[in-house]
Image (cartoon, rainbow, N blue to C red):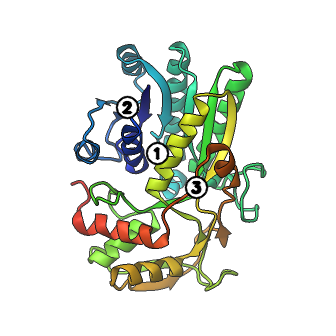
C-alpha cells in the first residue's frame, strides 16, 4: 500500500514517515524544504533501513503533483505541508491563506482526479478557540484566534463539504495538541529556522547555551503555579496516531475528527522543572507579560481516539524531555 506524505521531511512528517516504513507501508514523500532540510531523508533511511521515493516540489505546482500520482500507485494521502507559525500568520495573513488553502485545494483536486479518496489531514487544537473549557472534546463549537488556526478550520469545513458531495471519501481530521520530543535515536527531531517559536526547542537551545534565557509569558493564570497549562505529546506517539488513523480510515467512509494528546496538562514551569531534573541542566527564565490570545488551560479528551483508533500514548513527560535534549545535544545546529 503506497502512502503519499506531503511535508514528509518536516518535524512531525519525518517521524510519521519512520512509523509508516516500520509498519511496512510504501511511502512517497513530497517536500520543498521550505521548513525542513534534505539531510532528514538520509536520517529516515538510516533509522528504518528502508528506501522511499522523494519529490522536491511545492504543492502549488499542480502539473508536478499530477506527475507524482501518474508515476506512483497512491492509495492514500497524509497531508502535513503548509505554513505553521501562529505569530507569523498574524503578521502575514494573506501569505498563510493563499499558501495553505490554495495548495490544499490543488492537492485534493488531484486526488479526486486520480480516484484517491483516503486522507489523513493534520489539523490543530487551535480550532477550539478561547471559550471552551478543558478537557476538550471533538464535538465542541469551533472558532479561531489567528490566521493559521483559521486555515485549519476552513480546511476541515472544506473536507466536510467534500464528503457531502461524494460519500466515497474517508477522512481523518487529527487535531494536535503540543508535540515535543524527538526520535529516541537522536537522529531526527525539531529543527526550527532561526529563533524557535515553540516552547521545547526554545528550552533546549537555552540549555545548550545558544539562547540566554527562556521567557515565560504570564504567571498570574488560575493554574497550579500561575503559568499556562498545555497538553504535551511525544512526537513519536503522535506519529503512531497517524498510522492508526490511516489504518482505520482505509476500511471505512466518512469524516471524523480526533484529538491527539495525552489527556493531561503540564504548566510551563512544570515542563521546565521536568527538563532540568531529567537532564541535569539548568534553564534560566524570566517572567514576562501574557501573550494576547493565550488561554490558561488547554488539554485534550482523547477517549475518542482511544476507542475508535485503538490508539494511546506510551511516552511520558520525562521521555519527552530526555529525547528533546538528546536530539539538541547531538545536533546543536539541527540538520544544518
Q: Position of residue 113 (x, y in %)?
A: 53, 13
Nearer the observer: mark 3 or 1; the answer is 3
Nearer the observer: mark 2 or 3; the answer is 3
Q: Height in image: 228 above or below 130? A: below
The residues tagged by marks 1 and 2 sit, at their Cα atoms, a distance apart of: 22 Å
Q: Position of residue 56 (x, y in %)?
A: 30, 31
The residues tagged by marks 2 and 3 sit, at their Cα atoms, a distance apart of: 24 Å
Q: Secondary structure at mark 3?
A: loop
Q: Position of residue 85 (x, y in %)?
A: 48, 54
Direction from residue 158 to residue 194 in the image, left or right: left
The reply to whether discs 3 and 1 touch (Cβ–Cβ < 8 Å) is: no
Crowding near pointer 2: few (<14 within 10 Å), some, many (20+)? many
Which mark identifies residue 157? Answer: none
* Residue designated by label 3: 312
Image point (41%, 71%), residue name: 321
Of mark 2 and mark 3, the one earlier in the sequence is 2
Direction from residue 33 to residue 290 in the image, left or right: right
* Residue designated by label 1: 83
Amino acid at each position: 500500500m503506497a502512502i503519499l506524505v506531503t511535508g514528509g521531511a518536516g518535524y512531525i512528517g519525518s517521524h510519521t514517515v519512520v512509523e509508516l516504513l516500520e509498519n511496512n507501508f510504501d511511502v512517497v514523500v513530497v517536500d520543498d524544504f521550505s521548513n525542513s532540510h534534505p539531510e532528514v531523508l538520509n536520517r529516515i533511511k538510516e533509522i528504518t533501513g528502508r528506501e522511499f521515493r522523494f519529490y522536491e516540489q511545492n504543492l502549488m505546482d499542480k502539473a508536478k503533483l499530477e506527475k507524482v500520482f501518474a508515476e506512483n500507485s497512491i492509495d492514500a494521502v497524509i497531508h502535513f505541508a503548509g505554513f505553521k507559525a501562529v505569530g507569523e500568520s498574524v503578521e502575514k495573513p494573506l501569505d498563510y491563506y493563499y499558501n495553505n488553502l490554495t495548495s490544499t485545494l490543488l492537492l485534493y483536486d488531484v486526488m479526486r482526479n486520480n480516484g484517491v479518496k483516503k486522507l489523513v489531514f493534520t489539523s490543530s487544537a487551535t480550532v477550539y478557540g478561547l471559550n471552551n473549557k478543558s478537557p476538550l472534546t471533538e464535538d465542541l463549537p469551533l472558532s479561531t484566534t489567528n490566521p493559521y488556526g483559521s486555515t485549519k478550520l476552513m480546511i476541515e469545513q472544506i473536507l466536510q463539504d467534500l464528503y457531502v458531495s461524494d460519500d466515497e471519501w474517508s477522512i481523518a481530521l487529527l487535531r494536535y495538541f503540543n508535540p515535543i520530543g524527538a526520535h529516541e535515536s537522536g537522529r531526527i527531531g525539531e529543527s526550527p529556522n532561526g529563533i524557535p517559536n515553540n516552547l521545547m526547542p526554545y528550552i533546549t537551545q537555552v540549555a545548550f547555551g545558544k539562547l540566554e534565557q527562556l521567557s515565560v509569558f504570564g504567571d498570574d493564570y488560575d493554574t497550579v503555579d500561575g503559568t499556562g497549562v498545555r497538553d504535551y505529546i511525544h512526537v513519536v506517539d503522535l506519529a503512531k496516531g497517524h498510522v492508526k488513523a490511516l489504518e482505520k480510515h482505509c476500511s471505512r467512509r466518512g469524516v471524523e475528527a480526533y484529538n491527539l494528546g495525552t489527556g493531561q496538562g503540564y504548566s510551563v514551569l512544570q515542563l521546565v522543572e521536568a527538563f532540568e531534573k531529567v537532564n541535569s541542566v539548568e534553564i534560566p527564565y524570566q517572567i514576562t507579560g501574557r501573550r494576547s490570545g493565550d488561554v490558561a488551560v488547554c488539554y485534550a479528551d482523547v477517549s475518542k481516539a482511544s476507542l475508535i483508533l485503538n490508539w494511546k500514548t506510551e511516552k511520558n513527560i520525562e521521555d519527552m524531555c530526555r529525547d528533546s535534549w538528546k536530539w539538541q545535544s547531538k545536533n546543536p545546529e539541527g540538520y544544518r
